[in-house]
Image: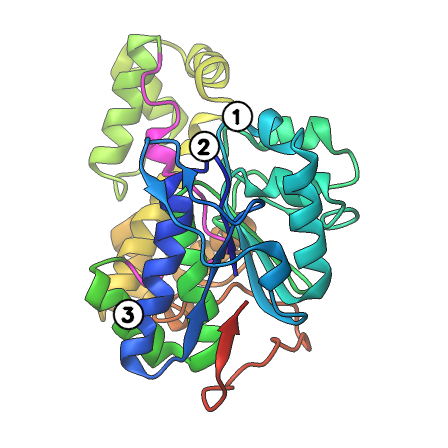
Amino acid sequence: MIVAFDQVQLLDVSGPLEVLTTANRYGARYEVRVVSPTGLDVRTSCGMRIGADARVEEVPRTVDTLVVPGRRDWRRATADDELIALVGGLAARARRVTSVCAGAFLLAQAGVLDGRRATTHWELAPQLAAAYSRVAVEPDPVFVRDGHVVTSAGVTAGIDLALALVEEDHGADVAREAARQLVVFMARPGGQSQFSVRMTPQEPRHPLVRRAMDKVTADPSFPHGTEGLAAGLGISARHLARLFRQETGMTPGQYVDAVRVESAQALLSSGTASVEEIAREAGFGSSETMRRVFQHALGVSPTVYRARFRTTAPSLPRGTRTADAGCAGRSDDLT
């Protein structure tokens, strides 16, 4: 069941909907319905109208999976008592509850996220944390699972989320075929950052910081020590460190490690080179050094990251049971 309402972001609705219906071509059996508070059509954020399949009264008593999309002006959405009542009521009847982007605010307003970990679009994360103190907001991941509730980041993260749901229900092969058909990436793990470190900040104000960052990203494998970077810019290491912290919130060394992690992620995901070879090519020098940095930055080792490249599933604590995993033989009524 996908909730729709006036000014909802269109891709929050259409992204998951397209993934789930595409998966039906490869063995899934999703029956996706769109419900609105009034049962009438709604106008999306881009002006396009979308139709609702059912009124609230027509929704079955049991809801398998609930998808709650968002609206950029989340305050207007959370002030809509009828909408929040609809979301809260459906969530209470759902086996699995999910949100896309600012949809997390609707779940929070309905009390669904109280005492839970959650994420949303990185730009909105501080607002979610400030407005709902009982929600443990994690601003970086693509999606976060806490029990039967899964929240996802910005609009395209709804596609990642939907692929993860398909994999959970029908296995990686079906999810992979759907991803290939839609020409989207299958392997964006839930714990992966929402955006590249090379985009943060996009435009450092100080030209020396820009030059240092460009040098690191151009060749992550080069031994970029703070002293060497500073010498190349004609300033002291102390001055460079101060500028870096002002502009990026990181030390030069932390930025170098972050870029190298991204470089190694790409190499692990796309090639067959050994972990030791990738460690050297990415600039870590040794697989042990890369392992330590990976563990700190991503919470997984390089070998685990590589093994999971062909899966969308977020890392779960050891012993955690994924709900209805491997249930490819059953019908999935998304109502």
Q: Is residue 203 magenta?
A: yes
Q: Which residue is disc 1 drawn over?
A: 73
The x, y position of residue 205, in whole percent, is 35, 9
Check the image and report above or below for 266 versus 306: above
Q: Earlier in the sequence, mark 2 or mark 1?
A: 2
- The answer to which image quadrant residue 252 occupies is top left
Q: How many marks?
A: 3
Q: Nearer the viewer, mark 3 or mark 2?
A: 2
Q: Which residue is disc 2 drawn over?
A: 7
* Helix, strand or loop for disc 1: loop
Q: Main secondary structure of the magenta part?
A: loop
Q: Which residue is disc 3 drawn over?
A: 178
Label 1 sits on what residue type? Answer: Asp
Q: In this rendering, does residue 137 appear at all? A: no
242 or 78: nearer the eye?
A: 78
Quadrant of the snapshot with the C terminus: bottom right
Q: Earlier in the sequence, mark 3 or mark 2?
A: 2
The x, y position of residue 275, in whole percent, is 33, 66
* Helix, strand or loop for disc 3: helix
Q: Is residue 288 magenta?
A: no
Label 3 sits on what residue type? Answer: Ala
Which range is magenta? 185-204
Instruction: Check disc 3: other Cα within 10 Å, few if <14, some if 14-19, many if 20+.
Output: many
The x, y position of residue 36, in whole percent, is 53, 48
Check the image and report above or below for 301 versus 169: above
Question: Decide: marks 2, 1 in contact (CB < 8 A)?
Answer: yes
Q: Is residue 253 left or right of residue 283?
A: right
- The answer to which image quadrant residue 181 occupies is bottom left
Q: In this rendering, does residue 52 appear at all? A: yes
The x, y position of residue 140, in whole percent, is 52, 41
Q: CA distance from mark 2 to mark 1?
A: 9 Å
Q: Is residue 203 left or right of residue 299?
A: left
